[in-house]
Amino acid sequence: MTADLHLNHLELAYDYVSDPIALVDNGQNLIYVNASFENTFGVDKKELIQRPVKDLLLFLGNSSENNWADIFESLVNQTKSNWKGVADLISENGSMHKTKVSVSCLGNEQQILCYLLQFDAFIAIDLQEENLAQLAYRDSLTGLANRSLFNQLFDHEISHAERAKIRFAVLFIDLDKFKSVNDNMGHDAGDIVLCTIAQRLEQSLRKSDVIARLGGDEFAVLMNNIKDSDTVARVTEKLIREIKKPIKSGSQVMEVGCSIGISVYPDNGLDAEQLIQHADVAMYRAKHQGGSNYYYFSDALNRELQDIRLVEKQIVQALKEEQFIPHFQPVINQSSGKVVAIECLARWKHPQRGILAAMEFIPVALKIGLVQDVLNQVLKQAFSSLGVWHNQHDLNIPMSINITGAQFYQQNTFDLMAELLDKHQLTTNSIRLEVTESTLQDSGNDLVEQLKKVSLAGFSITLDDFGTGYSSLRFLQQLPVDTLKIDRSFVRNLDSNPHDKVIVKAIIQLAETLGIQAVAEGVENEQQRQFLTNNDCNIMQGYLFSPALSEADLTAYLSEHS
């Protein structure tokens, strides 16, 4: 009797067995499942045949000790007569069924016909194993799939889409303003937000879609079998609306938004790593557009990604070669015409592209975790220059330094500044630390407390880009701020936009009421200067007076204007 006839007889016999049965060939592909298998696990036989068994069954806890190749080899070599264990079966819609499975060989000493897999979905699994599965596969807070399970389901989705010649979308979701909730209302409130968002995602998506929490405030979705981009867009817009709805917990009302990046298989990648990376890049573009938005990965964005990757490599090399340098922009008192301060601005002395402004490299350095190294390289040179001006030229002018919210919390930032102050015989009142209004709002009360400590240490503090956020008067009164910098976006249109004139007047009056100095940045023409002077704002900086200068050029400038 031929092997095919043997298999036909086996299949006829197994169709009458009440337990779920599967047969696997020597290539480790499924060649048969019985009716009980289909009914128990809710799968279609046609979708399973000739699929690799590893795509269908995951071992409990994703144990590296258990893999199908090793199990089948042990049976072939007769080191084991059969194998028993626990596995999770993935159905086509991504749902999982925990089951016990027994594997044995069918054949004789000369030939292995196939492998028999017998399942028992109804035997209760030991509680310890169940907990292990939960830890291995599920996010403990939200109950969603965790990163480990998501990665396995992602590979399963790619295999299915490749066979069926269908497309699916990857949605990378990052919450907006979640840190503010955590900082201002506590981590319990943050947990409530994350659980509520998880529920809204489940309610807004199909049961066949995979939803995971990747960690922190990041979620991911696999939308399977999409017909067109419009469908994805409509679902994504719905998710943004649902997530944006207020979340109530007792007397607290919390509001967050989300930014979503989208990549599509096979258009934007053929493997999980590429697809999730591209969705991540698209998410960052959506966030930079103001949040509560979504963005598709595209060829143009791919070219931009390649440019960013090149800049990342060049930043690493630039740090080794000390290419990051300070430039200094004078701050002028219009009443006296003298320089009253300077702002230190990071520049990159690029070997091919010349002097690059901070916006060309700081966002990339921030993303790859090297912004502190760049800042340190710039600060060492800037403090050296300031020491020369103070000690050799007797020019006692303070220097402003831009610091991110994260850097305010890093003790090594202040350790370095203390070291440099001592080395160059400078005092803390010769340094002004600048923090943006938006950073202050995102970081909440914790940063306010840190600012107070920094102020007590003797540093002056400037609130930069003022007017772009939504600081309340009460909030401002709590801050140990010496200076408000009027954002250049308002100054730019003073000669043409009546609304900006009203805003700038209000900021100047607010600063006067609080006893804080107002500084206008980005002053570029005489009309702007005249308006500011007429409204009692005499401290200015901008291209009308001077661009950012090198140490040598600023030394000459100071000799003329101090």
Image (cartoon, rainbow, N blue to C red):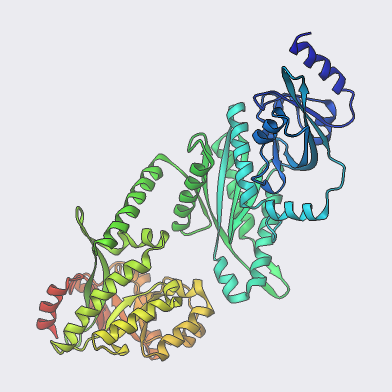
Q: Quadrant of the N terminus?
A: top right
Q: Is residue 279 above or below residue 81?
A: below
Side (left or right) of 87 relative to 389 = right
Q: Is residue 361 visible?
A: yes
Residue most toward the top? 1
Residue drawn at x 17%, y 83% as measured from the top left: 388
Side (left or right) of 205 relative to 43 = left
In depth, the one of 124 and 444 nearer the eye is: 124
Locate residue 92, reporting x and y percent: 70, 35
Q: Quadrant of the C terminus?
A: bottom left
Side (left or right) of 76 relative to 21 = left
How many numbered badges does the structure rendering display? Answer: 0
Residue drawn at x 42%, y 85% as measured from the top left: 454
Q: Is residue 422 above or below residue 72?
A: below
Locate residue 550, reporting x and y percent: 17, 71
Residue drawn at x 68%, y 52% as measured from the top left: 136
Side (left or right) of 256 relative to 14 = left
Q: Is residue 463 visible?
A: no
In depth, the one of 263 and 48 nearer the eye is: 48
Locate residue 34, reporting x and y percent: 82, 25
Locate residue 466, reporting x and y percent: 39, 75
